[in-house]
Image (cartoon, rainbow, N blue to C red):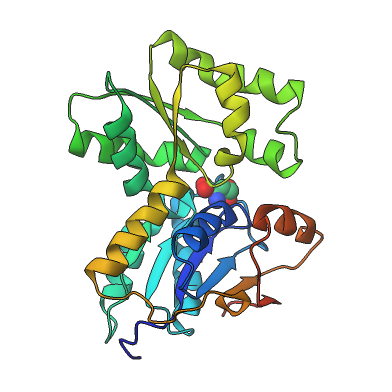
């Protein structure tokens, strides 16, 4: 393995939702090469136990290392919650250590920064909320913060059905978030890959609420890290050769893929099996 800065960046998610993070990365870093890995055969991770999420995440990271990645971005909140520390240790032990960035830390930093009253909301999958990882990291930075966490298991299927604008979705948003409004939460982090796609629906139900999209914050954190570690690509020209997608199951989700990619050119989409 070399320290060549032109190596690709590996981006990992349980499925296709992490394309929201990839989109921000491609926009922020047009000269970089990316390999996106979606574990579509085993999605969702959000209802699985920490042990299983850790095992799957380690398998995916080992696979991405075979592509000589220079940096691993864990786009999945659930995988970040359970496996970031594990992957960071594992990848630090390489001959050429590979840094790891998860989506939680950048989201937490922005959440605290944007809130005026430090009454903070966290939305995520059941597994992410149960991990307590967002709350732990918020309190590390801001011990006096009041945290209101809510698992929103219905959000992922609603987004996957393309139901962002339906009445049922608005009612479910009300159900999940009205307690936060009662508690005078002023800022909420969208702690799941799919939730940025509900941003305008949430915003129209709760216009006063500030929403933190961790995908944007993560792209900015990746740009900073590449600069700090002098890992920026020297390639001048962005282009279709810069993105390759690997999925563990290629199904009719390909339609979703096209929607989520929103015009990002892809060089190659491949099905791969792990192990
Ligand atoms: N990618 C997951 C996350 O961000 C959501 C989908 C899943 O449950 O696997 O937590």
Between 208 and 157, the residue placed more toward the observer is 208
Q: Which quadrant is the N terminus positioned in? A: bottom left
Front-lying residue, 38 or 87: 38
Q: Which residue is pictured at 34% across the width and 74% down the height?
A: 232
Q: Give x and y (percent) for residue 191.
A: 46, 40
Say if residue 45 shows up in the picture: no
**Above or below, 6 relative to 109:** below
Q: Position of residue 65 (x, y in %)?
A: 44, 80
Q: Residue at x 71, y 58 (%)?
A: 257
Q: Residue at x 45, y 21 (%)?
A: 209
Q: How many marks?
A: 0
The residue lying toward the viewer, choosing from 240 and 88, is 240
Q: Residue at x 49, y 67 (%)?
A: 30
Position of residue 189 measured from the top left corner of the image (x, y, whole percent): 42, 34
Residue lying at the far right of the rendered structure: 252
In terms of image quadrants, where is residue 168?
A: top right
Q: Position of residue 153 (x, y in %)?
A: 60, 35
In the image as oriented, which residue stretches furthest toward the front? 236
Q: Residue at the top extreme?
A: 182
Residue 116, quarter of picture: top left
In the depicted view, which residue is nearer to us: 211 or 173? 211
Q: Quadrant of the image for the C terminus? A: bottom right
Vertical relation: 24 (above or below) 122: below
Residue 222 shows in the view: yes
Drawn side of residue 271 relative to residue 79, left or right: right
Q: Is residue 131 left or right of residue 249?
A: left
For residue 173, side relative to residue 85 (left or right):
right
The image quarter in which residue 37 lies? bottom right
């Amino acid at each position: 393995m070399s320290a060549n800065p032109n190596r690709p960046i590996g981006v990992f998610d349980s499925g296709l939702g992490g394309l929201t993070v990839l989109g921000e990365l491609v926009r922020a870093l047009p000269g970089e090469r990316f390999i996106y890995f979606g574990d579509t055969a085993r999605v969702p991770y959000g209802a699985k136990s920490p042990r299983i999420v850790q095992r799957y995440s380690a398998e995916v990271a080992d696979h991405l290392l075979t592509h000589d990645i220079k940096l691993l971005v864990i786009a999945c909140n659930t995988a970040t919650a359970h496996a970031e520390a594990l992957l960071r240790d594992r990848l630090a032990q390489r001959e050429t250590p590979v840094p790891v960035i998860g989506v939680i830390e950048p989201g937490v930093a922005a959440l605290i920064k944007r809130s005026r009253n430090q009454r903070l909301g966290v939305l995520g999958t059941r597994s992410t909320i149960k991990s307590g990882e967002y709350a732990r990291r918020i309190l590390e930075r801001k011990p006096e913060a009041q945290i209101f966490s809510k698992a929103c298991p219905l959000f992922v299927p609603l987004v996957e059905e393309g139901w962002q604008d339906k009445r049922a979705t608005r009612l479910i948003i009300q159900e999940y978030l009205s307690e936060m409004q009662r508690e005078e939460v002023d800022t909420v982090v969208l702690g799941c890959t799919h939730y940025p796609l509900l941003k305008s629906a949430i915003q129209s139900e709760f216009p006063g609420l500030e929403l933190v999209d961790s995908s944007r914050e993560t792209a900015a954190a990746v740009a900073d890290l590449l600069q700090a570690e002098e890992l920026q690509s020297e390639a001048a020209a962005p282009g279709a050769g810069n993105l390759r997608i690997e999925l563990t199951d290629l199904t009719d989700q390909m339609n979703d893929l096209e929607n989520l990619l929103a015009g990002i050119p892809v060089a190659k989409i491949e099905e791969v099996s792990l192990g």
